[in-house]
Amino acid sequence: MNLEEVDASAWSSLEAATADPQSGFRFINLCSVDAAGRPQARMVVLRRVDTVARLIEIHTDTRSPKWLELSRNPTVTILGFSASTRVQLRLAGVVHLHSAGSELAEKAWSGLSVWPRSTYAGGPPGDEPRNLELVPARGEADGKAFFGVVSFRAESLDWFELRRADNRRAVFKYSHLGAVVASRWINP
Ligand SMILES: Cc1cc2nc3c(=O)[nH]c(=O)nc-3n(C[C@H](O)[C@H](O)[C@H](O)COP(=O)(O)O)c2cc1C
């Protein structure tokens, strides 16, 4: 594979993960920086990929700590690993947040089935669970107000392939519009 093919394969495997729950990149690590400057990481589901624009979409609850962190500091790293291909993708970039009522959140919500919708109808993430017997059950539609889309735009990719004797590593930089503006092999 040349550098162009490495970049294309990385993004096509991300795209494939949006449709295949068994894909290695289905669950990715979203890493942010909190108000105290500490790194924070959590697994999220890769929901949508736009290779041309280098965008990755993630769904979350706007009451979660990560939403506040990302609104204060939109600098993010996304880390993924596919055990089948032994490829690590480390994407650095920035996020834009789309909360309830925005066009993107409306569109994403309309594409969700009942089960993922219902995950937003519970109490605020991180809070102590309330006694369920005392709380009236809420329908899946109630979660809509807390549903948000995190849209990540990659500024760079650090690609690493783990091979027995000869690991390989390459880095790519993307323009605002998603074009590759620099790429090179580096020592693993
Ligand atoms: C496999 C897996 C997938 C997950 N997917 C999501 C997701 O798509 N969105 C999300 O907000 N949380 C997801 N979570 C939960 C997060 O990892 C995290 O625990 C939660 O969102 C709270 O994060 P925060 O306190 O940093 O806001 C997932 C957890 C696991 C284990």
Image (tube, grey):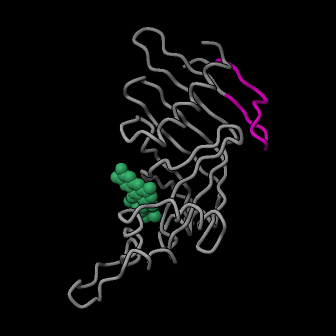
| Residue 85 sits above or below residue 124 on the image | above
Q: Where is residue 109 in the image (x, y as percent from the top left)?
A: 52, 65
| Residue 114 vs residue 31, the one in the foreground | 114
| Quadrant (top left, top right, bottom left, bottom right) of the N terminus | top right
The structure residue drawn at horizontal position 37% and vertical position 28%, both measured from the top left corner, is 83
Name the side, left or right, on which 25 lies relative to 181.
left
User: For residue 68, which quarter of the picture?
Assistant: bottom right
Question: Is 60 in front, or is 68?
Answer: 60
Towards the viewer: 67 or 54: 54
Please provide percent x and percent y for residue 36.
55, 64
The residue shown at (39%, 75%) is 121
Residue segment shown in magenta: 172-185
Q: What residue lies at 62% left-to-right and 55% top-to-bottom?
A: 151
Residue 90 vs residue 153: left or right? left
Where is 125 relative to 26, above or below?
A: below
Does the magenta portion include 177?
A: yes
Image location of residue 19, percent across then percent down: 46, 41
Q: Say if the magenta span includes residue 165.
A: no
Rendered-image quarter of ligand 1: bottom left
What predominant SS class does the magenta segment belong to?
strand
